[in-house]
Amino acid sequence: MSMIVRIELGVLEIELPEEVTCAQLDAEIEERTRKIQRHAFTEACSQLEAKKVADRKCPGCTGLMTIRDVDHRAVMMLAGVASVPVRRLRCPACGYRKAPLQDFLPTSRHTLPVVERALRLATEVGYVRSADILRRLMGATISHEQIRRMALLEAKRLGRDLEQQAEELFEWGVCPPDVTERKSDDTVVVAMDGGLVADRGTKKSFEARVGVVFCGTADVSKDRRVLRNRTAHVGIEDTQTFARKMSVLAIQAGMLTAGRTIVIGDGAGWIRRTARDWFPESVYVLDLYHLKRRISEVLGQEQDAWWHAAVVRACIEGRPAEAIRVLRGYDPGDDERARLLHERLIGYIRSNAEGIENYTRTDLFGSGSVEKAVDVIVSRRLKCRGMSWLKPGALGILKLRVLRYNNEWDSHWASRFAEAA
């Protein structure tokens, strides 16, 4: 059922100096317009309240409620702070009290559009700078601490569906919704990596794990390609929890009907275990860039060129045992660090033997997709100079950033606005 609210805005009359400049005129019109917007918001609230107050029947004893007093609520809207009068009713018979406009106004002192803009800024810059930008561009007075709390509250809403789908899948065997049908020649790629974030609590670091699921690439220009059907997840969680959620995303991407699934990682133990235990039918591939970087750490000198080429060739041909044999014949010298790196490289190749052998089964060798995701989602916001985080605060920002990475920001806030209505 619709409702009509009619507001008379009047005439905008501005007193200007005789030698007014264009800049002065623009600034004055903006300030006066904001004032009119605040008046319109207050007037609309009054009209809505009048409709609610018309029925004064007490829900408790059906007696007639009377107006006890009028409170004023400060509401931060897009045009600044509006002072909204709120009439509070009381039943003389039973003492029941209510304020009809209370449920309409935001529980915090900020409207949802203000919250959305504040959090959008917070995904890009720090809380202090976000508060300053809001004040300068919108006239909205909001502290950095308020924005931080907003991020924590909104983050609790994000990821609930994925958590529920993971629980239903692994506890009850319920297939997740919105599953894509793939063809036998399609390939679903699951790429995983992690980024270390400075921990304010322990003075050490914790890992933010990122996973990206996609199905092939598409050319958008001469030198640029995008991932098709790309979806990412980020979490500060244990391997099992992370793997369950990545399984849901892979199934939704069409893993069950695609011809094959490829899992790509940098060789970290938790990624290998995830590929083995949660994607047993997949082809695990070690990221070639990380492998070459490890090899160059040991065989990076000019005199090591032959050894370097021989090890890389053996790996690309899917022969990790041959690569280890070549490395065993190489003498790193007496330097303790060089000998340690040499042994670590042999252990790295041995641990990732399956991922190297699978080079012959695919032409997809790189984890650039998830490396980029880690950079965009984690590093650019959480790893700036001098930054450190507590896990709840870091996870709050990460969830908001992954919402943007997945191109779901607008749809999420559209549903939030509809929910608030």
Image: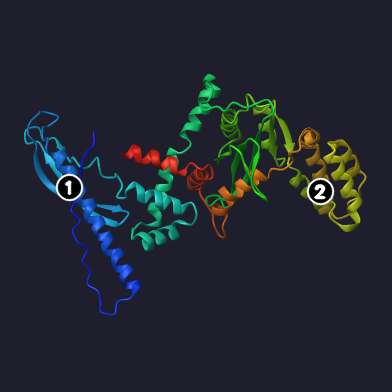
- Is 152 on the left-hand or right-hand side of 255? left
Taking the spot 17% from the left edge, 47% from the top edge, the residue there is 46
Q: Give the amino acid at mark 1.
A: Ser
Q: Classify 412 as above or below 117.
A: above
Instruction: Name the residue beneath numbered marker 1.
Output: 46
Residue that sits furthest to the bottom in the current view: 19
How many discs mark residues in the rendered view? Answer: 2
Taking the spot 54% from the left edge, 57% from the top edge, the residue there is 387
Residue 333 appears in the figure: no
- For label 2, count other residues whose C-alpha is less than 10 Å away and answer few (under 14), some (14-19) or many (20+): many
Residue that sits furthest to the right in the current view: 329
Label 2 SS:
helix
Q: Position of residue 207 (x, y in %)?
A: 60, 45
Looking at the picture, tell me which residue is in the foreground, 160 or 175: 175
- For label 1, count other residues whose C-alpha is less than 10 Å away and answer few (under 14), some (14-19) or many (20+): some
Looking at the picture, tell me which residue is in the foreground, 176 or 258: 258
Instruction: Name the residue beneath numbered marker 2.
Output: 295
Is the Cβ of the residue at disc 1 closer than 8 Å to that at disc 2? no
**Coloring applied to the structure:** rainbow
Q: Position of residue 85 (x, y in %)?
A: 17, 50
Q: Position of residue 204 (x, y in %)?
A: 59, 51
- Is 60 on the left-hand or right-hand side of 345? left
Label 1 SS:
helix
Q: Quadrant of residue 155?
A: top left
Q: Position of residue 99 (x, y in %)?
A: 18, 41
Q: Give the amino acid at mark 2.
A: Ile
- Is 148 on the left-hand or right-hand side of 269? left
Q: Give how far apart the Cα atoms at labels 1 and 2 are.
A: 72 Å
Residue 27 appears in the figure: yes
- Is 418 on the left-hand or right-hand side of 274? left
